[in-house]
Image (spheres, rainbow, N blue to C red):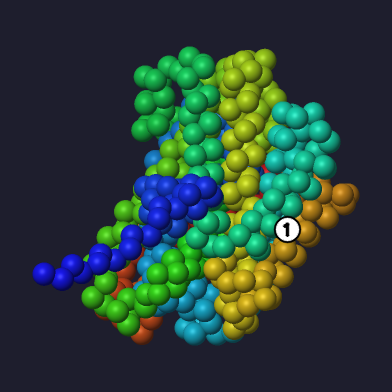
Amino acid sequence: MNDVPEAATPPPPTGYRAVWQRVKSHPLARVGPGLITGAADDDPSGIATYSQAGAQFGFDMLWTMPLCYPLMSAIQYMCACIGRTTGRGLAANIKVAFPPLVLKGVVLALLVANTLNIAADLTAMGEAGALVTGIDRHVMTAVFVTITLLLQIFVPYDRYVFFLKWLTLSLLAYVAVLFVVRVPWGQVALHTFIPRFKPDAAAAAVVVAIFGTTISPYLFFWQASEEVEDMEAGREAGLVKNPAAAPKELRRIRWDTWSGMFYSDLVAFFIILATAVTLHTAGVTNIQTAAQAASALRPLAGEFAFLFFTVGIVGVGLLAVPVLAGSGAYALADSMGWRYGLGRKLSDAPGFYAVIASSVLAALVLQYSPIDPMKGLFWSAVINGVVAVPLMAVIILLVSKKSVMGPFTASRTIVVLGWIATAIMGAAAVRMLIPG
């Protein structure tokens, strides 16, 4: 009998490659764009909004989170379906289905709002970094800007996106705060499911701010484009060209989006709760920044609560700033017909990466300008609130068009939730523009 030599088994990877193989096999690597999108929703400016809600009204704003959850999930689910079904980003689909003026107006407003929002987030990150390290906040801000730009431009997409997924764990810092303070859970449950607040101008303004920071246009563009990125990384076609993959992919998108938004919504709930049981109880009712909320926690809840809150600001900021910059870059590149994608090298998509760098660097310049970053945040919220309404209507129309989605148009339940969210955001936008 002739012995047939067995094929040589390649040696197992060692060193850096071995570590990376273990990282890629982690369950977190298989989580889709929904987790990153949801976590980025709780950015430092959002943390400031939720902190103000808890500090000013105590438990009386907890009910907003259960209300926001199905509405934000429905819109993000639509965006994910648009990207995965068509194989194109949100802006590219708007370009095909609507007049050019619609696309130009949306993209311009998105870029302006995102830059202002990035500036506010970088301010909060710099202040939080300064609180922990004692280093000047401008120096810390510059450090964070450098980190985010280097990661987005030079780190390959599959590694970079996994880094973002790990950063979502930083949001658990706000859950940890509740372990070092006393929480009256009976009252919490009562206020969560039975709204108790005076519908005056101050309460209305906070409700508007909560909805404005929770349902934001930049998340729409990011999630649709990340579905396209994941699809291209796996060398897959859109569902209109590969309908056999639809059942599996639509189930994944549904689970990924609704679980990602649940994570986001739950963390926002805990931020409101943490500041309600600490700051509001102690009579601290006016919070302007996330870093201010962290500082106020130190004498009330102790050093651990302060550190948890502060580290969370930096961690989620490192997650949110790339999402803000990336969403604008996706939108502009799509509308201009440029090559784009975090999976491409700098030389393959120079325009795309130029938009990312310009947005972040412009936001950094605002740190040294006379413009108050909190006023910038206010105006970004106003722009987002105004742009979100027609954009949400456009998204609902897109997922309802067979010419766009083929046989994979959205269900009636999702469409109804989308229109409810649009109506609420419309009312919020009107209220935001009314003084007093």
Q: To which quarter of the image does residue 102 belong?
A: bottom right
Q: How many marks?
A: 1
The quarter of the rendered structure image containing the C terminus is top right
**What amino acid is labelled 1 in the image?**
Val
163 sits left or right of 227 in the view: right
Q: Residues within 10 Å of mark 1 (few under 14, many from 20)?
A: many
Q: Which residue is mark 1?
A: 360
425 sits left or right of 337 in the view: left
Q: Is residue 62 above or below residue 177?
A: below
Task: Provide residue 3's location: percent of width, then percent of height.
Answer: 18, 67
Q: Is residue 61 above or below residue 248?
A: above
Residue 38 at least partly seen:
no
287 sits left or right of 366 in the view: left
The extreme front residue here reads 1
Helix, strand or loop at label 1? It is helix
243 sits left or right of 330 in the view: left
Residue drawn at (48%, 68%) of the image: 229
